[in-house]
Image (spheres, coloured by chain):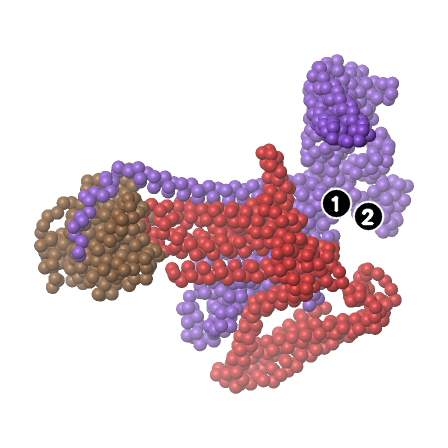
Chain colours: A purple, B brown, C red
Amino acid sequence: MTDTAAQPAASAHGSLAAGSSRLRQRRRAQSRLKAYGIAAIAFALLALATLVGSVVTKATGAFTNTHFTYEVTLSSEALGVTPDSPEEEIRRAPFGDLIDETLEARFPLASGRTERRALDALVSGGAQFDLAKHVVANPELIGQTVSYPLIAADLTDYYFQGGYGELETREVAGRLSVREGADGALVIDSTAEDFGEVLQVVKQSLYGDADRLREQAARQQNAVRVYGERAAAAEAEEARAAQLERQAAAEEKRDALLAEAEALEARAETAGGTEPLDDENISLLIEAGGGWIRMTEVSRSGGLGEALTEVDLPIEGTGDWRFHTTELSEARRAVSDHQIAWLETLAAEGAVERGFNTRFFTAADSRAPELAGIRGALVGSFWTMMVTFALAFPIGVLSAIYLEEFAPKNRFTNFIEVNINNLAAVPSIVYGLLGLAVFLNVFGVPRSAPLAGGLVLTLMTLPTIIIAARAAIKAVPPSIREAALGVGASKMQASFHHVLPLAMPGILTGTIIGMAAALGETAPLIMIGMVAFIVETPGSITDSATVLPVQIFRWYDFPEPGFEARAAAAICVLLTFLVAMNALAIFLRKRFERRW
Amino acid sequence: MYDTSKTADGATEQMATKFHCADVQVFYGATHAIKDVNVDIQDKTVTAFIGPSGCGKSTFLRCLNRMNDTIDVARVEGTILLDGEDVYDARVDPVQLRAKVGMVFQKPNPFPKSIYENVAYGPKIHGMARTKGDLDELVERALRRAALWDEVKDRLDATGTGLSGGQQQRLCIARAVATEPEVLLMDEPASALDPIATSQIEELIDELRQNYAVVIVTHSMQQAARVSQKTAFFHLGNLVEYDDTSKIFTNPEDPRTESYITGRIG
Amino acid sequence: MSLTLFAVVLLIALASHFMAQRKALAIAGGRAGVLHSRPVFHGLYSLLWVALAGIGALLVSATLGDWLIDRVLMGRIEAARPSMAPLERQLLLSDAKALAEGRMSSRGGVLRDQIAAAYDWMSATRNWVVIALSVGGAAVAARITYGRVSAGWRARNRAERIMLNILLAMATIAILTTVGIVLSLIFETVRFFGMIDWRIDKFILGATWSPLSGVFEGQMDPDKVGALPLFAGTLLITAIAMLVAVPIGLFSAIYLSDFAPKRVRAVAKPLLEILAGVPTVVYGFFAAITLAPALRDFGEMIGVRISSESALAAGLTMGIMIIPFISSLSDDVINAVPQSLRDGSLGVGATEAETMRLVVLPAALPGIVSAAILGVSKAIGETMIVVMAAGQGANLTANPLEATTTVTVQIVALITGDTDAETAAGPAFTLGFTLFVMTLVMNILAQRLVRRFREAYE
């Protein structure tokens, strides 16, 4: 030892308990790193919660649906069939017209073509087929009056879910009188100022209108300036005159707009008075005299209105009335005031029933959201998974046995290994292209069929299964093989009789995880045409089919809110399957895991 | 029977107490790994912990600089005082403690960095050098103390993992002394080394004694006899006997100690 | 039909197994040591050969038969309508097949009926030939293997050799898959480059992507196949995704591996893995239906216009998808850094954070970089999220708030679009090939890095 001169300082680091500022700083750095880690995990878990939460929230709409239970008289005349008619004839009877006519008879005020169509649109186009099926099964019903549940249209369903905003019932103090005015409009009067509050809301919207007018006026002012500049720049007298003329016109328009805006603002500022209502205003609906009235003009204590459904007139100072306002203006929702009145009337009569949507699980795809279900996609997924499992499992296990137990260490087997590792990371869409080029175009596998999908998913899943199976086989200790070989078993027997059964839980776990990934796969199946619209539930592996994830993708693409809910609901079903499969895998691992 | 001449004079000279341990208990979950250990470890002395494997000597060593803190299930009770301060006091930061009580492990574990970076690591994190020159000086001093300077002074930028096993262990010793500790704990520092490297390490330990209190765990009784002045014999979690090395090896009081050093248990 | 036939062949194989085994038993006559191989191996040998012969004959004759029928019928159509375009002929043939099988055809016609009739009897003949060959093949194999059963016959060695070859064949499927991918992609890629006069530079650097608008007489306008906007869009979205995934994934891994209490780790790790198991179509739905509108509203609130199909929404969602990927791979490598290094660092009085930052992370760096590369490779190959949330228009932009498109989106658009499949296949497969090469290079790089890491510590 050459260096003995420098003794360590008696206490280079000071007393143990006295934390130096440097040490505090270092401890803070440690807390910071921990905080980053916790924040990162919190972010990831929050993302998971948001993802699941948003899907579940959106899905609730699809798990319930709405039926009408109003009575329909299955008269022989209207249907043109008798209980003894042949089944096919009954099936083709005009049940749709019957349903519509019953509804129209209930609301005779809906007279115009457009209004009738709006009324008929409350019921799904699928209701007639349900009813026809029911009557075919029970022909004795012809001639009777039934209240068979008729599936409501998406619009109805969405309205009752509150998708178009809630109907707010306001408190009223006065007694209501309604009589028919001179021009056919209904004159509405309350003994109290029941509409004062709403009038203020309506007036508030006038400011918005005034602002828009002022914006337009500003544009005209701009035009005035531009024409002025052009006039100043014009050389010919004629051109100058033309520009000035235009300038004058713009000035006039500007002034008119400003005046209008001022008038609106003045109206908004003065309390009282009457305000006309249009479809840009929220709707003011009065329920009285057994019907619904929409206000077209409102003052503090009354106004004008029109009947949406039949009203017993005149109404003389009744206290039995209700006043509703909508959240959205009529122009901003798909459901009209008339439809609201009809639906609320039917609901009040108890002819609207909301319940669990069994159809979602028993029906195949449809163009109408209220009729669409996941059965077709589920069966398609089932067949596809069957093909995948039937091919990927044996091929994967046998490959793994070869590679682990028999393969000589040479460049060929090394190449296979590298290949498998790379295949595991090839983008799924490339497998789709492979399937398109090879299975569909070269081997002529039917397009859109579970067979094609299963083949593509087999190739995708194989690396996962092989890697998992190899790991499981590798985990079986060599002593097991040696014991088997020692009693005279061949290498093949040792592998199949002893190693494979012991490795099986691990192999199955890997296979289930691979299958779960395949079940959620979308892109490659789109490539091989499984994205087609298929109403029939597939019956075999060569029928055209779609699968659950692709169904989700298709539904997401449709504009109707009902399809969005169905896509979300299908996601819930898909996630349930995936969770179940993964739980099974975890169970297998826990139950059969062996530590050697 | 054993060569104790080298250590004899050191042992007689009474040094200041560095570690005072009283009624130390260690639990690993439900296992009572160390039972009622009372021992005073002296400054500028090499103390050897010997005993059959699994007797708790390494566990006890790791209590001295709270390396057991890194194991979730370990729990330490009793008193361990370093220069009169309670090591397990809530206000004590183990980081501060470990700077004062350095440690060398069984397997050489140099960082995958250059030799220079390995040695400079401690001084850097403790902020012991203001300038690059200071740091260079610290690194050189530590490497000289670890008797490695002459072998590596031309290749300080070479990676530490490229050295031979014995050199790696001396590098780890240099790394430990670079923070200028007061105590050096060594957990079987030569068990992974060949005989030549082992004897180099042993020589080094003897020299380190001039500046530090050294505590060494070893399963080799010859090694304990060669390098230490004091020896503690552990058996089944108990400290059976603690005395001058020469006394332990020539005239043990406890029959278990005698059985062990004569090779009947172990 | 073929499924039934398949079952029949398997039945024959089982029967031959039974017969051979019985014959062997009879030869042995209850005495041990007479036979070289146990009876069950005689059975197995027979079963394997019969199944192989039968199924082989089935597959070969069925495929060959279909091919032959198509050739003959196409020849007839060509003879009848020499002026018809090949694509039209294809359509006619598939119509005729549909007619013959009693399905709906797109059009009727005399020629279609004639071809349908021809197809009808030809496919009937084909079916009989396939049945005869496969059952016959199986029967012959059964006869031969049955004849071979004798005391000295080394049935076990033979059977095991067949098994070994089957195992090898299964393992080779991985190679066949790669070959299939490469061949199918290269074939169309070469054809596509031929269509643009081998102006590969225009494909890689051109800024206008509208490949189907410039199709003329089998040629494409090289000025309209510039894939640069797609590459840029892919890069942009990948960059956003990695900005989310790498820090969050890495910090999660650091915390979970060295700092988290055991119970936190036991809960958080599986939860993170759930994120990895969520199908991409679900992420796409989330991005398009929840995140994009939320971002747009947020943008409105702070006065920034965010397109409803923005690179931001797609990138953020993709980042979330890749978090568990980065975190679990990083967790693995951080855990693989030996404890002795941590001890060494803690032993000189470093804090856990310093140990992580100065010792563990540098040591784990190759593994972490490899995880990030694999993450990038996953991001550029991801399809559903971008198809649902990123938009279709190929505009060259670096603004993450605008709609942009990616390589994968365009592949889907081309393949599922309305245009004639043969024209669309060229650019689609070329993009696919580009994607394949890019991901392959990254995977190999990542594997190299991680192998270097493993060699250092294991």
Q: Would you call the spot at circle 1 few (<14 residues within 10 Å), some (14-19), or many (20 or more)?
A: some
Left or right side of A421 for B37: left
User: Where in the figure is residue C323, as x and y percent of width and height?
Assistant: 51, 49
Residue plotted at (68% across, 74% down) = C60
Q: In which image quadrant can residue A140 be found?
A: top right
Residue identified by numbered label 1:
A368
Q: Amino acid at mark 1?
A: Ala
Q: Is residue A187 above or below residue B205?
A: above
- Subunit that carries the residue with mark 1: A
Q: Is residue C434 visible?
A: yes
Q: Is residue B51 visible?
A: no
Q: Amino acid at mark 2?
A: Val
Q: Nearer the viewer, residue A218 or B94?
A: A218
Q: Is residue A345 above or below residue B218?
A: above
User: Where in the figure is residue A463, as x and y percent of width and height?
Assistant: 54, 62
User: Where in the figure is residue A308, as x and y percent of width and height?
Assistant: 80, 27
Residues beneath discs 1 and 2 located on the same chain: yes
Left or right side of B22 for C92: right
Ranked by sequence position, the earlier of labels 1 and 2 is 2
Q: Nearer the viewer, residue C301 or A504?
A: C301
Left or right side of B72 for C143: right
Residue identified by numbered label 2:
A136
Q: Quadrant of the N terminus of chain A?
A: bottom left
Residue plotted at (84% across, 21% down) = A185
Q: Would you call the spot at circle 2 few (<14 residues within 10 Å), some (14-19), or many (20 or more)?
A: many
Residue plotted at (58% across, 82% down) = C23
Q: Quadrant of the C terminus of chain A?
A: bottom left
